[in-house]
Image (cartoon, coloured by chain):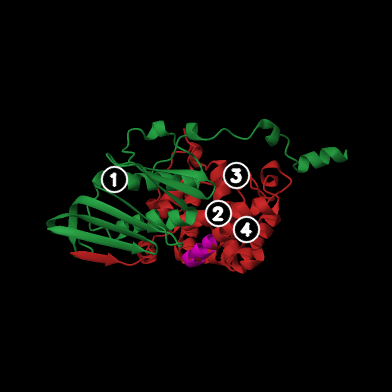
């Protein structure tokens, strides 16, 4: 049975197509999508400019992974180098290009590379919220769930130069100055 | 077959998951079950790293700047979530937040992982209640940055930034090197803006777990 699901948000629509195996979701009794065949994400900004990114199961898994990694990087500021992600499918990549700008790059075989730039608000509302919505109402079986892990201290940026960190002026320093 | 889903906040799902938590058992040291939703991080002596202590306190400071009754709301939420066994009332909260080394009256002891979990759960719970305001302020902030107009054109954002700067200067020891790096209005506005986005991130699915994990990023071996 072919199943099509649509998750709509302001300026972002996620459409998933696939097949079910006849089982039903226990939460809302809707058929479970066990095989995902096609995923499409329609993005439009307030100026009316719109983009479509689409692909199969690999694309969707890559989109989820990229959004998850980028969200964690945004929260902690600890960047994972590309070498650390090389074992993952990197069909979709998201990078911070400016303090408030994020660039999503979609690479599909046989097609030109597609780039979508978005602000932090758009990143929050577009891919992240739509994937959140999909997760909440998921009558689909995900092939692989994201596991959240802390990033090692070796990934941290080096601390500020010692000249900036030295000699804090605490109460003891004031006392010493008086004498 | 087509199923259409309209945007909705995950509040109902998350709030229901936060009900019915047993009290903290001081004798056995068992955690309330709500804290079990956050992963146990292997940190030395069960004490949080410096950055975690600072970040949690700043998130709560941002909530206080967003909501005029924020400090009371934190206490009420701790009570609602039955976390008063972990953080004992107003004085307990003050002591735990005082572990932030940037504070004027900083405590010598460190924040324990259980206390950090309780504060993160509370902050995320309050952030979900403030989702609409958070989203509006983040959008206003973006518009302000893009258009470069006067901040007074965005009164809600101006109020929030003003309150955050006042709270920060009142409570942090700005003579120390760390806080003094964020002493100018512009730097404090940037910090307040970043905290807004972080709080908005917490309101999504698994936002609480993601925030918790990110607090220890780059701090463990």
Badge 2 density bin: few <14, some 14–19, many ≥20, Cα 10 Å: many
> Closer to the camera: disc 4 or disc 2?
4
Whichever of labels 4 and 3 marks the residue nearer the N terminus, that label is 3
* Chain on which label 4 sits: B
Residue B132 highlighted magenta (yes or no): yes
Note the chain letter of the red one.
B
Is A100 rendered above or below residue B138?
Answer: above
**Tag 3 secondary structure:** loop
Question: Which dot, 4 or 3, sits closer to the camera?
Answer: 4
Query: Disc 4 versus disc 3: distance between alpha carbons?
Result: 44 Å
Q: CA–CA distance between discs 2 and 1?
A: 31 Å
Q: Disc 4 on helix, strand or loop? A: loop
For mark 3, what is the residue?
B109
Tag on residue A59? 1
**Image-based side of A25 in relation to B83, left or right:** left
Give the Cα separation between the discs numbered 4 and 2.
Answer: 20 Å
Mark found first going from the N terminus, 4 or 2? 4
Where's residue A86, x and y in %?
Answer: 35, 33
Where is residue B216 shown, x and y percent of the image? 48, 42
Residue under label 2, please give it. Answer: B195
* Chain of the residue on which disc 1 is drawn: A
Q: Could you say whether the residue bearing mark 1 is in a helix, strand or loop?
A: helix
The Cα–Cα distance between marks 3 and 2, rounded to whole angstroms, is 25 Å
Q: Which residues are magenta?
A: B130-139
Q: Is residue B209 visible?
A: yes
Do the dots labelled 2 and 1 sit on one chain? no
Q: CA distance from mark 1 to mark 4?
A: 38 Å
Please report contact status of discs 4 and 2: CB closer than 8 Å, yes or no: no
Q: Which residue has dot 4 on it?
A: B148
Q: Residues within 10 Å of mark 3 (few under 14, many from 20)?
A: few
Chain ID, mark 2 = B
* Residue beneath the point at 23% across and 63% down: A27
């Amino acid at each position: 049975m072919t199943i099509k699901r649509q998750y709509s948000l302001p300026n972002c629509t996620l459409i998933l197509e696939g097949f079910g195996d006849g089982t039903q979701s226990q939460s809302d009794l809707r058929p479970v999508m066990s095989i995902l065949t096609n995923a499409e994400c329609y993005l439009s900004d307030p100026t009316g400019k719109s983009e479509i990114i689409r692909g199969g199961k690999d694309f969707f898994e890559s989109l989820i992974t990229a959004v998850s990694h980028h969200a964690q990087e945004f929260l902690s500021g600890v960047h994972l180098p590309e070498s650390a992600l090389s074992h993952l499918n990197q069909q979709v990549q998201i990078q911070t290009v400016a303090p408030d700008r994020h660039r999503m790059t979609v690479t599909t075989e046989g097609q030109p590379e597609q780039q979508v730039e978005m602000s932090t608000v758009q990143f929050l509302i577009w891919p992240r919220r739509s994937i959140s919505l999909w997760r909440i109402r998921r009558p689909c079986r995900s092939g692989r769930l994201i596991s959240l892990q802390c990033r090692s201290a070796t990934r941290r940026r080096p601390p500020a130069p010692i000249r900036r960190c030295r000699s804090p002026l605490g109460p003891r320093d004031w006392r010493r100055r008086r004498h | 077959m087509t199923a259409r889903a309209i945007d909705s906040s995950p509040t109902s799902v998350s709030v229901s998951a936060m009900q019915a938590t047993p009290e903290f058992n001081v004798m056995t040291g068992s955690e309330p079950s709500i804290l079990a939703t956050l992963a146990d991080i292997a940190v030395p002596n069960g004490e949080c790293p410096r950055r975690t202590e600072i970040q949690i306190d700043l998130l709560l400071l941002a909530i206080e700047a967003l909501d005029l009754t924020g400090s009371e709301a934190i206490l009420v939420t701790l009570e609602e979530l039955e976390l008063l066994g972990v953080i004992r009332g107003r004085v307990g909260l003050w002591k735990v937040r005082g572990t932030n080394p940037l504070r004027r009256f900083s405590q010598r002891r460190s924040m324990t992982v259980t206390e950090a979990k309780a504060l993160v759960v509370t902050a995320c719970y309050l952030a979900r209640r403030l989702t609409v305001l958070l989203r509006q302020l983040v959008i206003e902030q973006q518009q302000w940055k893009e258009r470069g107009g006067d901040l007074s054109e965005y009164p809600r954002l101006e109020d929030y930034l003003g309150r955050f700067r006042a709270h920060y200067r009142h409570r942090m020891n700005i003579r120390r090197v760390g806080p003094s790096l964020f002493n100018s209005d512009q730097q404090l506005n940037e910090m307040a803006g970043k905290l807004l986005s972080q709080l908005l991130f917490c309101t999504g699915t698994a936002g609480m777990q993601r925030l918790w994990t990110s607090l220890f990023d780059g701090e463990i071996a």
